[in-house]
Amino acid sequence: MSDEKGLVIIYTGEGKGKTTAALGLVLRAVGYKKKCLIVQFGKVWFTGELEGVKKLSPFVKLIQGGKGFVKILGDKLPLSEHKKAALDTFNLLKKEVKSGKWDVVVADEIVGAVSSKLLPLKAVVMLITDKPKGLDLVLTGHHAPKKLIEMAGLVTEMQEVKHPFQKGILAKKGIDF
């Protein structure tokens, strides 16, 4: 872990590219032999990043947590199951953040977990407050609360201008997942 002060970085907004930006940051960090952890909230299916990250071993580890997205893509699980899964994933994330093993930690879709009430905002606030000094912590997801934006050193909002889905074109392998 670096002696340099770590950043809190948020990628938020309605546009595509939040996870992609975070993964690009990880790719750059690996170029400097930094140890990176990616914890994904709500993503439990195969994505290209699962296979891609294997090629970046031993510098990157990816953990998927949760039960899928809430109330979309045919989700029929009770909210209580999603909340329990998000809390379990958060507790694992918190343990890893405090471990001192990582230079960069990405909490992918954690912002969405907060905005959809799966995780309490105060838990993420404490994660930021208690993170090791040199750790760069990246948070992604829709609807970043003002409190998280205030705590971050870098915030980028993705704005959708045009998307193939608007023309009925579904997600594309290697581009969207």
Image (tube, rainbow, N blue to C red):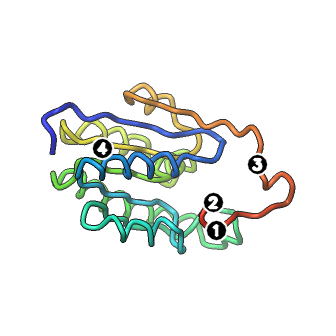
Residue 21 coordinates in the image, percent (x, y): 49, 45
Front residue of 157 and 109: 157
Q: What element carries label 4?
A: helix
State the mark number for residue 176: 2
Front residue of 94 and 175: 175
Going from N to C along the chain, the mark reached first, 3 or 1, is: 3
Q: Pointer 4: residues within 10 angstroms few (<14), some, or many (20+)?
A: some
Mark 2 and mark 3 in contact (Cβ < 8 Å)? no
Residue type beneath disc 1: Lys
Q: Which residue is drawn at 66% across and 73% down?
A: 76
Figure check: 30 above or below 53: above
Q: Is mark 2 on a helix, strand or loop?
A: loop
Distance CA(mark 2)–CA(mark 1): 6 Å
Distance CA(mark 3)–CA(mark 2): 11 Å
Q: Pointer 1: residues within 10 angstroms few (<14), some, or many (20+)?
A: few
Residue 95 coordinates in the image, percent (x, y): 23, 57
Q: What element carries label 1?
A: loop
Residue type beneath disc 3: His
Residue at the far left in the pictured view: 3
Q: Pointer 2: residues within 10 angstroms few (<14), some, or many (20+)?
A: few
| Quadrant in the picture for the C terminus | bottom right
Residue at the far front in the pictured view: 31
Report the residue marked by disc 4: 127
Q: Residue at x 32, y 50 (%)?
A: 105
Residue type beneath disc 4: Leu
Q: Residue at x 44, y 60 (%)?
A: 40
